[in-house]
Image (cartoon, rainbow, N blue to C red):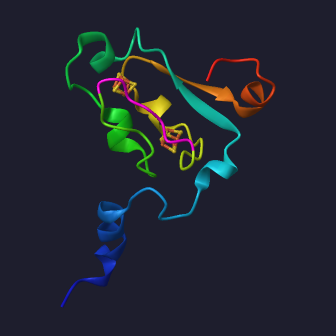
């Protein structure tokens, strides 16, 4: 019989985009990557991808230039916190609404 204490771990392992709805509507800040600092983008090789690994909403792609799915990114900032080279900056959402920053 499965140990009920580990149910939450099972859930975390099988989560995917949309499990909690379109969490992007909650966002007050959005992550922006400086690709000149991002390891896979800079080297052209699949390396690092810690932003993909740590994102609780699977809202980062595991691609050479990681991309955010803004329908599901809730702006928690974990990816920015975990990026080992400081390539991700959290930028206020209102900056984009006013057209003041490139998307
Ligand atoms: S954690 Fe940082 S360096 Fe690593 S893939 Fe993501 S943005 Fe690039
Ligand atoms: S801020 Fe980063 S870690 Fe948080 S949901 Fe968005 S992409 Fe995922």
Q: Is residue 69 magenta?
A: yes
Q: Image quadrant of residue 48?
A: top left
- From what the image shows, is residue 73 above or below residue 43? below
Furthest toward the bottom, the residue is 1
Instruction: For ligand 1, give the image quadrant.
Output: top left
Q: What percent of the width, then of the height, locates residue 55?
A: 42, 44
Q: Main secondary structure of the magenta part?
A: loop
- From what the image shows, is residue 58 above or below residue 88? below
- From what the image shows, is residue 60 above or below residue 98? below
- From what the image shows, is residue 42 above or below residue 10? above
In this picture, which residue range is highlighted in magenta?
64-70
Q: What percent of the width, then of the height, locates residue 9?
A: 31, 67
In the picture provided, is 91 more to the left or to the right than 77?
Answer: right
Q: Is residue 66 magenta?
A: yes
Q: In percent of the image, x 49 and y 42: which residue is there?
A: 69
Report the front residue among 28 and 66: 66
Q: Image quadrant of residue 36?
A: top left
In the picture provided, is 11 more to the left or to the right than 18?
Answer: left
Q: In percent of the image, x 37 and y 71: which residue is there?
A: 8
Q: In percent of the image, x 59 and y 41: which residue is there?
A: 75
Q: In percent of the image, x 49 and y 29: which residue is there?
A: 80
Tell me the quarter of the image containing the C terminus.
Answer: top right
Q: Image quadrant of residue 66?
A: top left
Question: Total marks drawn?
Answer: 0
Q: What percent of the width, then of the height, locates residue 82?
A: 41, 32
Report the front residue among 60 and 50: 60
Furthest toward the right, the residue is 98
Q: What percent of the width, then of the height, locates residue 72?
A: 54, 50
């Amino acid at each position: 019989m499965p140990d009920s204490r580990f149910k939450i771990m099972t859930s975390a392992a099988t989560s995917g985009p949309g499990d909690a709805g379109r969490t992007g509507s909650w966002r007050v800040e959005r992550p922006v990557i400086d690709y000149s600092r991002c390891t896979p983008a800079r080297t052209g090789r699949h390396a690092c991808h810690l932003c993909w690994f740590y994102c609780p909403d699977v809202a980062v792609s595991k691609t050479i230039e990681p991309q955010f799915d803004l329908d599901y990114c809730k702006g928690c900032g974990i990816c920015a916190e975990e990026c080992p080279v400081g390539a991700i900056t959290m930028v206020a959402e209102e900056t984009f609404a006013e057209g003041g920053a490139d998307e």
